[in-house]
Amino acid sequence: MAAFAVPLMIAGTAIQAIGAIQQGNAQAAQYQAQAQGQEYNARVSRSQAEAAGQQWSAREDAQRRQARQILGRQLAATAQSGVNLNGSAADIFRESLVNAEQDALNIRYEGEMTRTGLLNQAQLSDYEASASRTAAKSARRSGYMSAAAAIASGGYAYSKFPAGATAAGGGVGIKGNGGGFGLKGTGSGFGLKLRY
């Protein structure tokens, strides 16, 4: 029975180690894909921030042009009516100028807030991408560490078998007698051999 236990134990250890590496690599690939998506989101947010800055700047310019046209018409109507721009007429015109400038500055502020929000989102996406890449490295490293632990655990369990169950030759293994399954020790590790 020991003849079957050792090979199965070694095969199980190898499968466990390979599975740990594959799991670590799969998780790392998932984190890498997340990082790529987050980097894409950062690029999109930066592009949107640039477009928003141009768009809001154009709105501010349009507001100023419209205000100048309205104020120009008001000034022309005032002059045509013969009213002098002194006193209350001058105060009303000055108030109109201040209101027009305030409207333009409000548009600028709203544009800057939109642009800043998009740039902040881009920075957050960059940070998330960096964290995902770090997690990918950790997942890959964890897979290899789990594989090493599985091999060490399997080696320890193997060392508990009686001396007669191992094969000589520098590796681990068992020789099959007669017919059946066996492991043959090699100089650098172990190999599986099926004997008939």
Image (cartoon, rainbow, N blue to C red):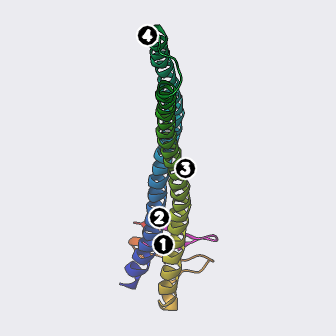
Q: Quadrant of residue 12?
A: bottom left
Q: For label 1, count other residues whose C-alpha is less than 10 Å away and answer few (under 14), some (14-19) or many (20+).
A: many
* Pair 3/1: label in front: 3
Magenta portion: prevailing SS class: strand
Q: For label 4, count other residues whose C-alpha is less than 10 Å away and answer few (under 14), some (14-19) or many (20+).
A: few
The magenta stretch spans which residues? 182-192
**Numbered badge on residue 18:** 2
Q: Which residue is mark 1?
A: 183
Is residue 63 shown above or below 47?
Answer: above
* Pair 4/2: label in front: 4
Residue at 46%, 14% in the rendered image = 78
The one of 174 and 23 positioned closer to us in this rendering: 23
Q: Which residue is mark 3?
A: 123
Q: Secondary structure at mark 1?
A: strand
Where the N terminus falls, by quadrant? bottom left
Q: Are marks 2 and 1 in contact (CB under 8 Å)?
A: no
Q: Secondary structure at mark 3?
A: helix
Q: Which residue is mark 4?
A: 81
Residue at 43%, 70% in the rendered image = 16
* Pair 4/1: label in front: 4
Give how far apart the Cα atoms at labels 4 and 3 are.
Answer: 58 Å
The one of 194 and 161 positioned closer to us in this rendering: 161
* Pair 2/3: label in front: 3
The one of 14 and 193 positioned closer to us in this rendering: 14
**Which comes before the other along the chain, label 4 or label 2?**
2
Q: For label 3, count other residues whose C-alpha is less than 10 Å away and answer few (under 14), some (14-19) or many (20+).
A: some
Residue 46 is covered by the magenta coloring: no
**Which comes before the other along the chain, label 4 or label 3?**
4
Amino acid at pointer 2: Ile
